[in-house]
Image (cartoon, coloured by chain):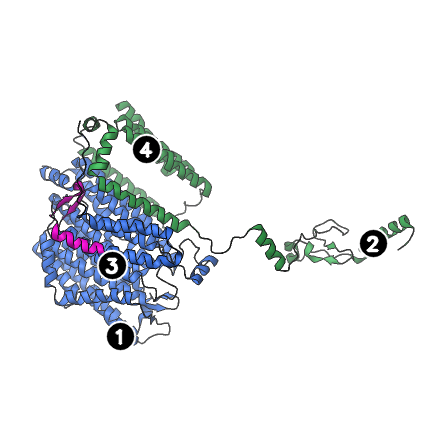
Chain colours: A green, B blue
Amino acid sequence: MTFLFWILATLSVIGGLGMLLSRKAVHSALWLALTMMCLAVLYVAQSAVFLGTVQVIVYTGAVMMLFLFVLMLIGVSAADSLRESIRGQRPVAVLVAVALGATLIAAVGNALDFSVGLQAANAEYGGNVQGLAALMFGRYLIAFEATAALLITAALGATILAHRERLFPRQDQRTRSVERFRSGVHPGQRPSPGVYARHNAVDVPALLPDGSAVPDSIPGPLRARGTVREIDATATEEVLDRLVGGAASDTGGER
Amino acid sequence: MTPISVVDIDYVALAPVIIVLVAAVIGVLLEAFLPEAARRSGQLLLTGSAVALAFLTVLIVAASRPFGPIAGGSLMLDGPGLFLQGLILLTSGTAILIMADRRVDPGGDAFAGRVSTLPGGEEEREVSRRGLMQTEVWPLMLFCIGGLLLFVTSNDLLTLFIALEILSLPLYLLVGMARRRRLLSQEAALKYFLMGALASAILLFGSALAYAYAGTIEFAGIAERISERTTANTLVIAAVALILVGLLFKIGAVPFGQWVPDVYQGAPTPVTGFMAAAVKVAAVGALLRVLYVPFGGMRWEWEPVLWIVASLTMLIGSLVALAQSDIKRMLAYSSIANAGFILIGVAAADQVGLSSVLFYLLAYSVATLAAFGIVTMVRVPTGEATSLEQWAGIGRRSPLLATAFSLILLSFAGIPLTAGFIAKFGVFTAAITAGALPLVIVGIVASAIAAALYVRIIVRMYFTDPVSASAGVASPSPLTVAGVGLGVALTVILGVFPQPVLNLVEQTSIFVR
């Protein structure tokens, strides 16, 4: 028993320190889970079986894993919380925490002079779970029932803070497409640059069949930077001639 | 093997709490099933009648039920508990009147139309264009009131802790729901939540240590174990220290009340009023019970701590209030200072002290509610005019409002013929009889500092020329007028004719152990 205690106590303190000192939030959460598991085993070892089980199922299994999921989904990065906004706060906090811890350890260590033990408590109602039931539905019924108010408040609060009603009509593909045609802008794809031009480079505008340039075919950033290449009119002519000349020789010289 | 016994519950004695909490649950159901248009009136009707009914029930219980533990010993029915329950319902009812007003703000009531919308976003504009209102506020208020009622009557540390959580959780939400200056409000809510969670944890830790010491969390059992002790036990001292920290946090005493100015400033003003009045009443009530009943035998250990905390609270509250330029922050520091005066009475640790604290709570809570009610009415186009500069010359434009506010400030300052004078006189007398003369001297110095502050504001309202950015006074609905009127009227009546109430608090001020 003492052997078990020292191993688990060491592990849970390591878990607690690890939670505080690890830089990544996910690692912190995992360290905390370790501490909780150790506590659960300690509870069971002290014949509080139900509490130990609940600790594993509810705290470690549900709450802590939910934490982990949230951390992973939101993606808290390590750089987020490490900046001190108040200068010198950290050393002072460490000092005060150590002082408080030392005081409490001294106070608790000096004074624990009796313990009834859970064996007697468990025997009174014929078991651990029965004993808890006797307390929860007997002496502490009001506290137990009042917890309902707490849970409803939490659910209500989460709804208020997170639930967004649909204030504007839902945008589906149809409404979006109708809107786009109504607005009068070019509805289809734009011609890509360089298609009819001599170059296939992105900074050369596409040409319409009549030989005029399509400025919209150049990507916006290039237009904004002003690096659009002018179309060399002679080159166009030359290409046209060659194309047309080729075509003429193919079709018998008609232009 | 003992069979599990069924607890005998006196439902009549428990009725005030049951009425309020059941009404809160019905309120949540109304949210689900009533159409948007009918929700606000439905909720108002439900909330108002529940609080009124609960108040009546408290009177009935006080008249008809024998004092003693109820509901298996979780709660204690006694004079101070019932008085505080009545006071909580009275102040909550007044706060609800002020909260229900939708005329002073052209946009609606004091709460954001939809809290989930981004501040300043497209959706927020759409919400205010449609005039939507967040009606979940009312069930949250009822849950909070239910928690307050449990808090002042709880008879063991577990019920105390759960009551504390029931009252805190809705407050964290309500603080962050202001219609105007929403980012400030949300920041306040987050601060309050983080600090409050820490304070709750400390209280719980203290309770665990108390259990480790006494082997029970029932107040009577702890008191018995303490009376048996022969030597000083470090465990129980640590327990009292931690529990004190948790409770003094809610009261807002220095140095645990660092959250008060930020939260009072950021919260919607009617909620600030509610926190400064009803929540403070409940927190002081719980502190009184915890110090007098389970830890009464340790008076010599906790009294010096309370002396120091009370002195610091009065002095720092009054001094820092002098430096404020924002009316809500000023009132927040003034409420910290008032918490210090209340603690003088608590430190007296006898029946006179208890009755003086009960009277102080009544006088202070009605006045502070009226003060925050008046703050909601003084407005500029973008919201409340919280900057003190904008209050210049209010007295010339709306003399009635300025008179009411001056009366309240005079009561805070403790000028004769106001309730504040009788209240301060009461706690000072109690402290002198209990041998706490140094504390009284500090109290008088702090009162003088605070009086200078309040007179400065009165001078600003009456004798300063209005500046171009000066605020106007919105015409309030009858609800706010009733709420503020009740507060001002009680402040005057209790100052001129306090004897019936003094008799009442004297009769009620015995804790059943």
The mark found on residue B93 in the picture is: 3
Residue B66, horizontal then vertical, whole percent? 11, 48
The mark found on residue B433 in the picture is: none
Q: Nearer the viewer, mark 2 or mark 3?
A: 3
**Amino acid type assigned to the residue bearing label 4 in the image:** Gln
> Distance between the Cα atoms at labels 4 and 3?
41 Å
Residue B189 as seen in the image, left or right of residue A135? right
The answer to which of marks 1 and 3 sits earlier in the sequence is 3
Regarding mark 3 in the picture, which secondary structure is present there? helix
| Classed neighbour count for the residue bearing mark 4: other residues with Cα under 10 Å, few (<14), some (14–19), many (≥20) | many
The reply to whether discs 1 and 4 touch (Cβ–Cβ < 8 Å) is: no
**Amino acid type assigned to the residue bearing label 2 in the image:** Leu
Q: Identify the residue under disc 1.
A: B399
Residue B47, horizontal then vertical, whole percent? 28, 56
Residue A67 as seen in the image, left or right of residue A246? left
Residue at 14% x, 55% y is B345
> Distance between the Cα atoms at labels 1 and 4?
63 Å
> Distance between the Cα atoms at labels 1 and 3?
27 Å
Regarding mark 2 in the picture, which secondary structure is present there? helix
Q: Is residue B385 magenta?
A: no
Residue at 37% x, 33% y is A61
Q: Nearer the viewer, mark 1 or mark 3?
A: 3
Q: Identify the residue under disc 2.
A: A240
Residue A62 vs A183, above or below: the answer is above
Q: Nearer the viewer, residue B372 or A204?
A: B372
The answer to which of marks 2 and 4 sits earlier in the sequence is 4
> Distance between the Cα atoms at labels 2 and 3?
88 Å
Q: Specify the segment rendered in magenta.
A: B53-78
Q: Nearer the viewer, mark 1 or mark 2?
A: 1
> Distance between the Cα atoms at labels 2 and 4?
82 Å
Q: Identify the residue under disc 4.
A: A55
